[in-house]
Each structure stands twice: as structure tokens, then as C-alpha cells.
Image (spheres, rainbow, N blue to C red):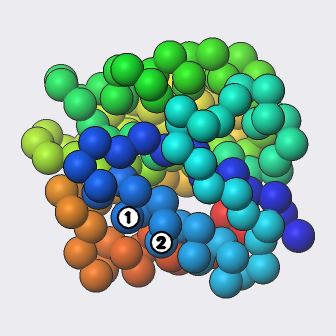
Amino acid sequence: MAKVLVVYVTTTGNTEKMAKAIVEGAKGAGADVTCKTVGDATVAELANYDVIAFGSPAMGAEVLEEAEMEPFFSEAIGTLSGKKVAVFGSYDWGDGEWLRTWEERVKDGGAVLVGSVKAHLEPDDDAIKECKDFGAKLA
């Protein structure tokens, strides 16, 4: 059974809805899942998990949320070599460039990118189903 950590930050609740759907999908597929906001997570604990899914909305000019997720991820990436990592989040404008950039950062840091999922604004029923399926894949 895979141990999965979902760690996210949300500003309007959209990324949180995605995180909950990913957790539901992973648990439904038999994974041992822990879900935390980035403020409650530590970089040290990442070593205890087989798969880590990071979630953040796009901010500013399509960048990660800057107050909590950016500093956390910047510190964490050096500890994730060989680790299975997924990224997800919601966005309002643009085309999801922040997620593609994040995927590259994961790969450049030596982690194994297992996928990503994004939603435009509030996740609709299709996006929630995609998140549940994504969670099952992480398991």
C-alpha cells in the first residue's frame, strides 16, 4: 500500500476542493493518505511517504502561491530526488503555464513526476472526477 501525502495551499478554496477529491480517489484505491495544508507540513516528513502531491493555485504572472508554497517547495525539492511527485492546482487566467513550470522544476530537481491536474477557477464535476481518478493513479 502506497503512503501518499497531499500538501496544498488554497486562497479561495478551489485548490482545497481538488485536494479533497485527490485524497478520496487515493483512499478509494487503497492508499494510506495524509492531507495537510502547507503550513502544517514539514520538509523533514516528506521522507516518510512514497508519493507526494503538491497543490497550489496560480498567482500573479502564473507562479506558485508565494507566501507559503513557494518557500516550502524550494526547500523541499532538494530532498525529493528519486521520489514520486505530483502537482495540481487551480488557475484563473492564462493557460496553466505555472503548472508546466512546476512540472519542470520537479523533474529538474531529480524527482519522478507522476503527473499533474489543473482546474480553471472552481473545479466543476468533470474536474472533481479528474482529481479522483488522479488520486487513484497516485495510489
Left or right for 35, reference 14: right
| Quarter in which the N terminus is drawn | bottom right
The residue nearer to you, when weighing 103 against 42, is 42
What amino acid does circle 2 point to?
Answer: Ala
Query: In what element is the residue under mark 2?
Result: helix
Q: In x, y percent, where is residue 89? A: 37, 49
Give the number of marks.
Answer: 2
Residue 21 is tagged as 2
Q: How many C-alpha atoms fall within 10 Å of the one at disc 1: few (<14), some, or many (≥20)?
A: many
Which of the 4 quarters of the picture holds residue 119? bottom left
Q: In x, y percent, where is residue 66? A: 35, 21
| Quarter in which the C terminus is drawn | bottom right
Q: In x, y percent, where is residue 84? A: 73, 46
What amino acid does circle 1 point to?
Answer: Lys
Residue 100 is tagged as none
Left or right for 84, reference 131: right
Identify whether 4 is placed above or below 60. Answer: below
**Residue visible at 52% across and 44% down in the picture:** 37
Q: CA distance from mark 2 to mark 1?
A: 6 Å
**Residue visible at 28% across and 82% down in the picture:** 125
Identify whether 97 is placed above or below 32. Answer: above
Disc 2, disc 1: CB below 8 Å? Answer: yes
Query: In what element is the residue under mark 1?
Result: helix
The residue nearer to you, when weighing 88 against 35, is 35
Left or right for 25, reference 103: right
Q: Is residue 77 visible?
A: yes
Q: Which residue is mark 1?
A: 17
